[in-house]
Amino acid sequence: MTTLSIFNPDKPESPEQVVENPAEIARLLKEQGVRYERWPTRALPAEATGNDILEAYADEVAHLKEESGFVTADVVSLTPDNPDKEAFRQKFLDEHVHSEDEVRFFVHGQGLFYLHLGEKVYAIMCRQCDLISVPNGTRHWFDMGPDPEFTCIRLFTNPEGWVAQFTGEDIASRLPRYEQLAGAA
């Protein structure tokens, strides 16, 4: 189940609020300028390629491209047997921003986005069928956990793909990691 945990970074030991209702999650995130929605599940074979996945969600991807000016979409997957999984995890664990919206649709699996919005941190455990769009300039980080398993569609306005500017803040190290929040859900 998708879960939104809202933290006060000065009291990171436990969230101030935990929400599991998708409509309420969407409402709370929309108040902060963050898009969250659920897309329908598409039947895909286990061996589906990135092209198969993009074809299955072609209408939704085309709509987002037209609506928000995205020029490219791709599919990224990570599994627990990937020998570079720890390096991939570390790459995204520090607070950063982008000069474009960061859009992810979870086709399979899950991952944890942390959004540093004002005086709060919104930690959203995204799961299959969740779409999140983190607005450009939003301080955030992503934790895929020690044994990542996910497949996501990513959309970009920059053809170079994922480009981050790290803030240098240590806030990400002070909040509970994926292991703690995944176990609580």
Image (cartoon, rainbow, N blue to C red):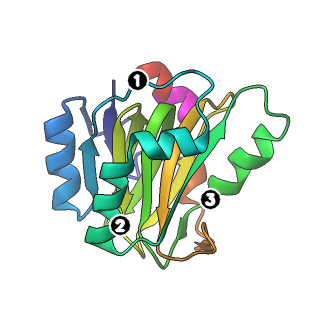
Query: Which of the two residues, 75 or 43, is positioned nearer the viewer here?
Result: 43
Which amino acid is tagged 1? Ala
Query: Which of the two residues, 132 or 168, is positioned nearer the viewer here?
Result: 132
Q: Position of residue 31 (x, y in %)?
A: 16, 59
Classify mark 2: helix, strand or loop.
helix
- The quarter of the picture where the N terminus appears is top left
The residue pinned by badge 3 equals 94
Which amino acid is tagged 2? Lys
| Between marks 3 and 2 in the image, the one whose residue lies nearer the viewer | 2
Classify mark 1: helix, strand or loop.
loop
Picture quadrant of residue 38: top left
User: Label 1: how many residues lie within 10 Å, few (<14), some (14-19) or many (20+)?
Assistant: few
Determine the main secondary structure of the stretch shown in magenta.
Answer: helix
Task: Point out the stretch of residues depicted in magenta.
Answer: 177-181
Task: Work out how far the residue at label 1 is from the one at label 2, CA to CA, in angstroms.
Answer: 23 Å
Q: Residue at x 42, y 21 (%)?
A: 184
Q: Position of residue 152 (x, y in %)?
A: 51, 43
Q: Position of residue 40 (x, y in %)?
A: 28, 33
Among the two numbered marks 1 and 2 on one chain, the one whose residue lies closer to the N terminus: 1
Q: Position of residue 46 (x, y in %)?
A: 58, 21
| Between marks 3 and 1 in the image, the one whose residue lies nearer the viewer | 1
User: Label 3: how many residues lie within 10 Å, few (<14), some (14-19) or many (20+)?
Assistant: many
Query: Which of the two residues, 31 or 72, is positioned nearer the viewer here?
Result: 72
The residue pinned by badge 1 equals 43
The residue pinned by badge 2 equals 65
For the residues bearing labels 3 and 2, Cβ distance under 8 angstroms? no
- The answer to whether residue 96 shows anywhere in this view is yes
Task: Work out how far the residue at label 3 is from the one at label 1, CA to CA, in angstroms.
Answer: 35 Å
Q: Relative to residue 100, is residue 74 depicted above or below?
A: above
Picture quadrant of residue 22: top left
Picture quadrant of residue 24: top left
Which amino acid is tagged 3? Asp
